[in-house]
Image (tube, rainbow, N blue to C red):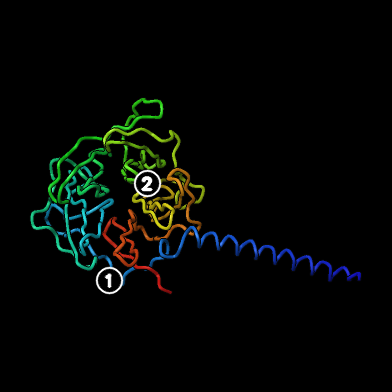
Amino acid sequence: MNLPKHLQILLLLLIVFSCKNEQKSVIEDINKEEFPAEMVEFVPYNANPVFKGTGIDTWDKQIRERGYIIYEDSIYKMWYTGYKGDDTVTKYLGYATSGDGINWTRYAKNPIFSEKWTEDMCVIKNKGKFYMFAEGRNDVAHSLVSDDGINWQEEGDLKIQAVDGKTIPGPYGTPTVWIENGKWYLFYERNDEAIWLAESNDHKNWINVHDEPVIKTGPEKYDAGAVAANQVVRYKGRYYIYYHASSDPMASSTEWTSNVAVSTDLIHWVKFPKNPIVRGDHSSPITVFDGKGYRLYTMHPQVFLYLQNKN
């Protein structure tokens, strides 16, 4: 049966539309599998911020950069950077605890480490010890070790080599560490231009897995100007990296956002198509698993809490 021309065109359009909808559905299913809601969909707590600088004449009048939170023995433990004055003032390490992750108590003997500029820290526990990787002055990354998370011993600046063994000149910023099968992995940025990956057997001497970045800026506008890793989480066989980014870090009006990407090997990453997951100049995101589910904290310039979206 020969259909009139206008009906043929209509049928063709219906077929094309159906194919596009089917393709869109497949993409959405892939995204739901790779980016499950519990890892990417969060809503702000209704009484933010949950922690901030004192605002008075104390060593932590202001806080900044990435702090870090671990949930252990039913206690939320937070390490944060405090300072007063301008950006050139030495940054010290503070500690606070909470029973609910909302109401925080500063440690009575803060700052807990003041021997060296310490900010933008990552804290990881391995074989009963706490390890901290942080920025020092001029974004020179260094490491510290502790038995209790309060008394820290400086271990020195990190040393990173290219694949051929040649030392890579610093700075190395926003050090983010992951441990798996006895191997230490370090994600780091250089002037926020990209994210590189290095590995180590002793957490002090590092060599690049590849000399090319594992996460680059762009192509979308939200992270076209700068990227820096904050935390790696493994969930249902995949790795999720939470990172902060900006479209143009040199512009005073630019906001820093919180974002996420997924990988199966720590090297090849796919950015969440709906990034940023948090806007409004709330950056340095980390997630905390409380035994039931994940919650998200953004650490800069104040600590904001985001809970899982149950809708």
Residue ID at (91%, 69%): 2
Q: CA distance from mark 1 to mark 2?
A: 28 Å
Dot 2 lies on which element? Answer: strand
Q: Which mark is residue 311?
A: none
Dot 1, how many residues are within 10 Å of its Cα: few (below 14), some (14-19), or many (20+)?
Answer: few
The image position of residue 134, as x and y in percent, is: 25, 44
Find the residue positioned furthest to the right. 1
Dot 2, how many residues are within 10 Å of its Cα: few (below 14), some (14-19), or many (20+)?
Answer: many
Amino acid under disc 2 = Ala
Residue ID at (34%, 51%): 231
Find the residue positioned furthest to the bottom. 311
The image position of residue 267, as x and y in percent, is: 45, 43
- Residue tagged by mark 2? 228
Where 139 falls versus 75 (above or below)?
A: above
Amino acid under disc 1 = Ala
Is the Cβ of the residue at disc 1 closer than 8 Å to that at disc 2? no
Q: Exactly how many numbered labels are in the figure?
A: 2
Dot 1 lies on which element? Answer: loop
The image position of residue 51, as x and y in percent, is: 22, 62
Query: Which quadrant of the figure has residue 215?
Result: top left
Where 64 falls versus 196 (above or below)?
A: below
Sequence order check, earlier mark of 1 and 2: 1
Q: Which of the two residues, 118 or 154, is positioned nearer the viewer here?
A: 154
Query: Which quadrant of the figure has residue 310?
Result: bottom left
Residue ID at (37%, 61%): 280
- Residue tagged by mark 1? 47
Q: Quadrant of the C terminus?
A: bottom left
The image position of residue 224, as x and y in percent, is: 46, 47
